[in-house]
Image: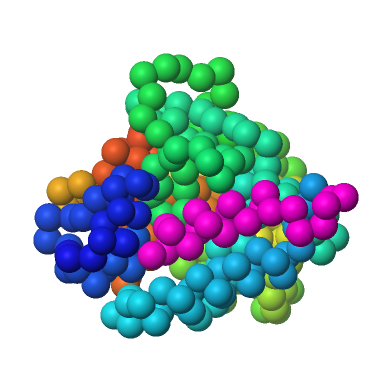
C-alpha cells in the first residue's frame, strides 16, 4: 500500500494487514478506526464552554464529515451509509459513552487486562492507544482488579450454570398454551412442541417483548414455568433472551462453535448471533468484513479466552 496518510494512521493505531488480505479491505479497516478514533475525540470538544458534554448531533456530524472526506480521498473504501448511527450505538452499548437527554460525554477512564491486553475506554484525544475495530487497547504486562467481563457487563455465570439456575427456580404448572405459542425445538422456533419431555423454552406474542416460559411436554400433559422478565430483557428490550436459548443449547450439547481463521496478524471470525453483551463487545473490537468480523489477532485470542469461560466454544477453520 503506497499511501503516506493511511500508512501513518495504521502505524499510529497499530493496525496490521493480514497475510492474504486485499488492499481495499485493509484500507477500509484503517479508515473505519481512524473515524472512530476522531469521533471519540470529539466527545472532548468544548462547543459550549459551560458544559462538559456535546450534543449527539455534534458526534454524528463529525463522523459524517470524516466519512465524506475519506470517501473523496479513497473511493475504493466502502463504509456503511449509517456509520454515524452504528458507531454512536456501539460506544453507547459498550459503556464508552455516558448519555443524558440529547447530550453525551466520554465515560470515565477504565481498563482491564486479559492475557497481556489492556482493554480501555474513556481515552483522551492525546492518549496513545492501539485499535481493533473501534475498540481501544494497549499491550500490558500488569494485572487488573477489574476483569474484562466485569468492565463490559458479561455474565458472571457460565451458560450451564445459568440453565441449572433456571431449572432450580422453575415453578411448574399444567397449562394449555394459547394459539400462536412458539416452541424452541432442535434449536429453532416451531409452532408445535417436542414430545420428548425434555425441558425447553416457549414464547408467546407476535413481537418482542414476548412472554417466555420453560416448558416440557411428554405427549400427555404440557407443563410450563414463566420466566421472569429480567431474565429476558434489559431496559431497551434488547435480545437478552438469547442467553436463555444459548444456555438451553449448551445444556443439550448443541451450541455451535464460533468459527475463525487466522490470517497472520488478524483473525476473521463468524460471530453474528450471540447475546447482546457478548456480541457488542466483539463488534466493538472488530471490523465488519463481508460475512465475518476481523480482529487484531492478539485481541481476538484474549476475547476468545473470556468467552470460553462462559461456555462458548471456538473452532479454527
Residue in view at x 70 percent, y 78 percent = 206
Residue 263 seen in this snapshot: yes
- The percent coordinates of residue 296 (x first, y second) are 30, 47
Query: For the magenta stretch, what is the residue range?
Result: 31-51
> Is 91 left or right of 108, judged from the image as shown?
left
Residue 304 seen in this snapshot: no
Location of residue 91 by image quarter: bottom right
On-image quarter of the N terminus: bottom left
Q: Main secondary structure of the magenta part?
A: helix
Using the image, determine if residue 238 lies above or below residue 301.
Answer: below
Location of residue 141 by image quarter: top left
Residue in view at x 40 percent, y 34 percent = 138
Is residue 169 inside the magenta stretch? no
Using the image, determine if residue 79 lies above or below residue 138.
Answer: below
- The percent coordinates of residue 114 (x first, y second) are 41, 28
- The percent coordinates of residue 129 (x first, y second) are 44, 40
Q: Which colour assignment does the render follow?
A: rainbow
- The percent coordinates of residue 40 (x first, y second) are 58, 53
Residue in view at x 36 percent, y 30 percent = 139
Using the image, determine if residue 84 lies above or below residue 42.
Answer: below
Is residue 44 inside the magenta stretch? yes
On-image quarter of the C terminus: bottom left
Q: Nearer the viewer, residue 267 or 183?
A: 267
The single residue placed furthest to the left in the displayed view is 20
Please state the total of marks drawn on the protein image: 0
Q: Nearer the viewer, residue 216 or 27?
A: 27
Residue in view at x 60 percent, y 32 percent = 110
Amino acid at each position: 500500500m503506497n499511501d503516506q496518510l493511511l500508512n501513518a494512521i495504521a502505524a499510529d493505531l497499530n493496525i496490521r494487514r493480514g497475510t492474504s488480505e486485499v488492499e481495499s479491505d485493509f484500507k477500509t479497516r484503517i479508515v473505519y478506526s481512524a473515524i472512530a478514533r476522531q469521533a471519540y475525540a470529539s466527545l472532548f470538544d468544548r462547543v459550549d464552554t459551560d458544559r462538559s458534554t456535546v450534543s449527539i448531533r455534534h458526534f454524528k456530524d463529525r463522523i459524517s464529515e470524516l466519512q465524506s472526506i475519506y470517501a473523496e480521498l479513497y473511493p475504493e473504501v466502502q463504509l456503511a451509509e449509517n456509520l454515524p448511527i452504528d458507531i454512536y450505538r456501539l460506544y453507547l452499548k459498550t459503556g464508552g459513552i455516558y448519555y443524558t437527554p440529547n447530550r453525551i460525554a466520554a465515560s470515565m477512564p477504565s481498563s482491564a487486562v486479559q492475557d497481556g491486553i489492556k482493554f480501555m475506554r474513556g481515552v483522551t484525544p492525546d492518549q496513545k492507544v492501539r485499535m481493533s475495530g473501534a475498540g481501544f487497547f494497549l499491550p500490558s504486562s500488569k494485572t487488573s482488579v477489574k476483569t474484562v467481563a466485569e468492565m463490559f457487563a458479561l455474565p458472571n455465570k457460565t451458560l450451564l450454570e445459568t440453565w441449572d439456575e433456571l431449572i432450580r427456580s422453575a415453578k411448574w404448572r399444567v397449562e394449555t398454551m394459547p394459539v400462536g405459542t412458539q416452541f424452541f425445538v432442535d434449536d429453532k422456533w416451531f409452532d408445535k412442541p417436542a414430545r420428548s419431555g425434555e425441558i425447553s423454552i416457549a414464547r408467546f406474542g407476535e413481537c418482542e417483548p414476548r412472554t417466555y416460559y420453560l416448558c416440557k411436554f411428554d405427549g400427555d400433559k404440557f407443563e410450563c414455568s414463566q420466566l421472569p422478565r429480567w431474565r429476558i430483557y434489559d431496559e431497551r428490550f434488547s435480545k437478552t433472551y438469547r442467553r436463555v436459548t444459548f444456555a438451553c443449547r449448551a445444556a443439550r450439547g448443541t451450541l455451535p462453535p464460533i468459527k475463525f481463521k487466522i490470517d497472520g496478524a488478524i483473525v476473521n471470525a463468524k460471530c453474528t448471533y450471540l447475546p447482546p453483551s457478548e456480541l457488542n463487545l466483539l463488534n466493538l473490537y472488530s471490523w465488519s468484513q463481508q460475512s465475518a468480523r476481523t480482529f487484531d489477532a492478539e485481541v481476538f485470542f484474549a476475547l476468545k479466552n473470556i468467552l470460553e469461560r462462559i461456555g462458548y466454544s471456538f473452532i479454527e477453520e
